[in-house]
Image (tube, rainbow, N blue to C red):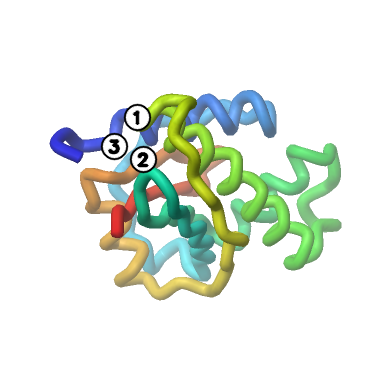
Amino acid sequence: MSESSGPIIDRVLINVLETMAFIFADPWEEIEVEELAPWLAVRLRFHGHGEGQVVLATTNRCARMLRAEVLGQDADEVTDAAAEDTVRELLNVICGNILTELYGSVPVFNLEVPEIRPAECDEIAGLAESPESGKVFIDGEPIIVALQPA
């Protein structure tokens, strides 16, 4: 990739949040990642026409809020497992849209099962600083999506 994919990822992230979860994103502001911990990171590897991974990072609070918005639940009633499932599915949709935006609809990609885990603050800071990332806030909670070619 010769140009930064950050603006494309921003556009895809905003569009997916609006269409999948009916959530309107706010512009990114610089943050102190330590103040928002704990964080989750979801990684989805892809192979085929190109290889790499897309990583979505957000806070535990945001994952619960996303689940609640998607299903019309109260965020306090959402389990960690349900919130994690929602973030995995969100990343599936985001990744597919990013690959289509970057490469068109003809190339074939194989997507692996998204892997989720707690994330360290230095990893989150690195994702946020990457020119290959899209970043937004929803209701004061951050979401970062980064493309990392192999």
The C terminus - image quarter: bottom left
Q: Which mark is residue 134?
A: 2
Contact, mark 1 vs mark 2 (Cβ under 8 Å): yes
Instruction: Mark 3 or mark 2: name the one nearer the start of the chain.
Output: 3
Residue type, numbered disc 2: Gly
Q: Is residue 118 left or right of residue 35?
A: right
Across and down, in percent, residue 138 comes to 54, 38
Query: Residue at image x 58%, y 67%?
Result: 116
Contact, mark 3 vs mark 2 (Cβ under 8 Å): yes
Q: Is residue 131 above or below residue 79?
A: above
Mark 1 to mark 3 CA distance (whole Å): 5 Å
Name the residue carrying label 1.
Answer: 8
Across and down, in percent, residue 72 comes to 84, 38
In front of the other: 58 or 88: 88
Across and down, in percent, residue 56 comes to 48, 53
Mark 1 to mark 2 CA distance (whole Å): 8 Å
Name the residue carrying label 3.
Answer: 6
Q: Is residue 13 above or below residue 63?
A: above
Instruction: Mark 1 or mark 2: name the one nearer the start of the chain.
Output: 1
Q: Residue 20 falls in which quadrant of the image? A: top right
